[in-house]
Protein backbone atom coordinates (compact mmCIF):
# COMPACT_ATOMS: atom_id res chain seq x y z
CA UNK A 1 0.00 0.00 0.00
CA UNK A 2 1.19 3.43 -0.75
CA UNK A 3 1.53 6.02 1.95
CA UNK A 4 -1.36 7.99 0.43
CA UNK A 5 -3.66 4.97 0.51
CA UNK A 6 -2.71 4.13 4.14
CA UNK A 7 -3.42 7.72 5.15
CA UNK A 8 -6.82 7.68 3.42
CA UNK A 9 -7.73 4.34 5.01
CA UNK A 10 -6.69 5.59 8.44
CA UNK A 11 -8.69 8.82 8.01
CA UNK A 12 -11.78 6.86 6.94
CA UNK A 13 -11.45 4.52 9.92
CA UNK A 14 -11.11 7.43 12.34
CA UNK A 15 -14.15 9.16 10.83
CA UNK A 16 -16.20 5.98 11.20
CA UNK A 17 -15.16 5.48 14.83
CA UNK A 18 -15.79 9.10 15.81
CA UNK A 19 -19.19 9.22 14.07
CA UNK A 20 -20.34 6.01 15.78
CA UNK A 21 -19.26 7.46 19.11
CA UNK A 22 -21.49 10.46 18.48
CA UNK A 23 -24.46 8.32 17.48
CA UNK A 24 -24.12 6.08 20.52
CA UNK A 25 -23.48 8.86 23.04
CA UNK A 26 -25.74 8.67 26.07
CA UNK A 27 -28.23 11.53 26.48
CA UNK A 28 -27.43 14.15 29.09
CA UNK A 29 -28.74 13.43 32.57
CA UNK A 30 -32.05 15.17 33.18
CA UNK A 31 -32.34 17.70 35.98
CA UNK A 32 -33.79 16.11 39.09
CA UNK A 33 -34.40 12.87 37.25
CA UNK A 34 -37.11 14.58 35.20
CA UNK A 35 -37.07 13.28 31.60
CA UNK A 36 -36.71 15.67 28.69
CA UNK A 37 -39.96 17.37 27.59
CA UNK A 38 -41.72 16.69 30.89
CA UNK A 39 -43.12 18.66 33.82
CA UNK A 40 -42.14 17.01 37.12
CA UNK A 41 -43.52 17.99 40.53
CA UNK A 42 -42.01 16.70 43.77
CA UNK A 43 -43.16 16.33 47.39
CA UNK A 44 -39.60 16.77 48.73
CA UNK A 45 -36.77 19.27 48.43
CA UNK A 46 -34.00 18.70 45.88
CA UNK A 47 -36.28 16.78 43.49
CA UNK A 48 -37.15 13.98 45.95
CA UNK A 49 -40.43 12.04 45.94
CA UNK A 50 -41.81 12.73 42.47
CA UNK A 51 -45.60 13.03 42.77
CA UNK A 52 -46.42 13.88 39.18
CA UNK A 53 -44.98 13.85 35.68
CA UNK A 54 -46.52 14.78 32.33
CA UNK A 55 -45.47 15.57 28.80
CA UNK A 56 -48.87 17.02 27.89
CA UNK A 57 -48.62 20.63 26.70
CA UNK A 58 -52.29 21.52 27.24
CA UNK A 59 -54.14 19.90 30.12
CA UNK A 60 -55.26 20.23 33.75
CA UNK A 61 -55.02 17.80 36.65
CA UNK A 62 -56.76 17.88 40.01
CA UNK A 63 -53.72 18.09 42.26
CA UNK A 64 -55.14 16.37 45.40
CA UNK A 65 -55.33 13.15 43.34
CA UNK A 66 -51.52 13.20 43.00
CA UNK A 67 -50.03 15.08 45.95
CA UNK A 68 -48.46 13.21 48.85
CA UNK A 69 -46.99 16.31 50.52
CA UNK A 70 -48.40 18.06 53.57
CA UNK A 71 -50.94 20.75 52.58
CA UNK A 72 -50.86 19.56 48.96
CA UNK A 73 -47.59 21.45 48.57
CA UNK A 74 -45.31 21.32 45.56
CA UNK A 75 -41.90 21.39 47.24
CA UNK A 76 -39.63 21.26 44.17
CA UNK A 77 -40.20 21.17 40.43
CA UNK A 78 -38.72 20.97 36.94
CA UNK A 79 -40.53 22.25 33.86
CA UNK A 80 -38.85 20.97 30.71
CA UNK A 81 -42.00 21.52 28.62
CA UNK A 82 -42.03 24.23 25.92
CA UNK A 83 -45.04 25.84 27.67
CA UNK A 84 -45.84 27.37 31.06
CA UNK A 85 -47.29 25.31 33.87
CA UNK A 86 -49.74 27.12 36.15
CA UNK A 87 -51.02 26.43 39.65
CA UNK A 88 -54.65 27.18 40.48
CA UNK A 89 -56.61 27.73 43.69
CA UNK A 90 -60.28 28.51 44.31
CA UNK A 91 -61.31 32.13 43.87
CA UNK A 92 -61.88 33.51 47.41
CA UNK A 93 -65.13 35.27 46.44
CA UNK A 94 -66.65 32.74 44.05
CA UNK A 95 -65.23 29.33 44.93
CA UNK A 96 -66.69 27.79 41.76
CA UNK A 97 -63.96 29.56 39.77
CA UNK A 98 -60.21 29.20 40.07
CA UNK A 99 -57.41 31.76 39.99
CA UNK A 100 -53.91 31.11 38.66
CA UNK A 101 -51.60 31.77 41.63
CA UNK A 102 -48.21 30.79 40.21
CA UNK A 103 -46.59 30.13 36.85
CA UNK A 104 -43.64 27.84 36.21
CA UNK A 105 -41.95 29.01 33.01
CA UNK A 106 -40.45 26.65 30.41
CA UNK A 107 -37.02 25.61 31.64
CA UNK A 108 -37.90 26.68 35.18
CA UNK A 109 -36.91 24.67 38.22
CA UNK A 110 -36.64 25.01 41.98
CA UNK A 111 -35.01 22.72 44.52
CA UNK A 112 -37.24 24.18 47.25
CA UNK A 113 -40.31 26.40 47.02
CA UNK A 114 -39.83 27.20 50.71
CA UNK A 115 -42.83 28.64 52.46
CA UNK A 116 -44.38 30.19 49.35
CA UNK A 117 -48.15 30.01 49.81
CA UNK A 118 -48.62 29.83 46.03
CA UNK A 119 -47.18 26.30 46.08
CA UNK A 120 -49.36 24.92 48.91
CA UNK A 121 -53.04 23.98 48.96
CA UNK A 122 -52.99 23.81 45.16
CA UNK A 123 -56.18 22.51 43.56
CA UNK A 124 -55.16 22.27 39.89
CA UNK A 125 -51.97 22.05 37.86
CA UNK A 126 -52.38 23.07 34.22
CA UNK A 127 -50.04 23.26 31.24
CA UNK A 128 -50.14 25.59 28.27
CA UNK A 129 -53.33 27.61 27.91
CA UNK A 130 -55.51 25.04 29.71
CA UNK A 131 -57.65 26.23 32.64
CA UNK A 132 -59.85 24.47 35.21
CA UNK A 133 -62.54 27.11 34.61
CA UNK A 134 -65.06 25.69 32.18
Image (cartoon, grey):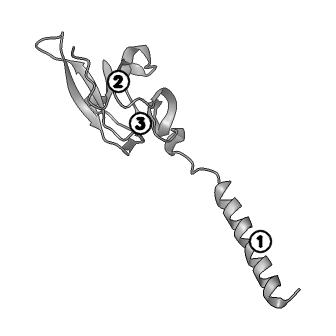
Query: Dot 2: within a 10 Å radius of its alpha carbon, few (fewer than 14), some, or many (20 or more) residues?
Result: some
Q: Earlier in the sequence, mark 1 or mark 3?
A: 1
Query: Dot 3: within a 10 Å radius of its alpha carbon, few (fewer than 14), some, or many (20 or more) residues?
Result: many
Q: CA distance from mark 2 to mark 3?
A: 17 Å
Q: Is residue 73 left or right of residue 53?
A: left
Q: Is residue 12 visible?
A: yes
* Residue ID at (50%, 45%): 31
Element at badge 3? Answer: strand
Residue that numbered label 1 is attached to: 13
Extreme residue in the bottom direction: 3
- Position of residue 123 relative to residue 109, above or below, is above
* Residue ID at (67%, 63%): 19
Residue 92, position as x, y percentages in the image: 14, 16
Q: Is residue 13 left or right of residue 49?
A: right
Q: Point out the image quarter for the C terminus.
A: top left
Q: CA distance from mark 1 to mark 3?
A: 45 Å
Element at badge 2? Answer: strand
* Residue ID at (38%, 15%): 64
Residue that numbered label 3 is attached to: 77
Amino acid sequence: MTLKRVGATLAAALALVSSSALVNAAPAAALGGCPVNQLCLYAGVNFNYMDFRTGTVSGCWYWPNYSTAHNRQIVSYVNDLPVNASLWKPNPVNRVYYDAVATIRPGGFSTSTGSSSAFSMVDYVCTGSASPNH
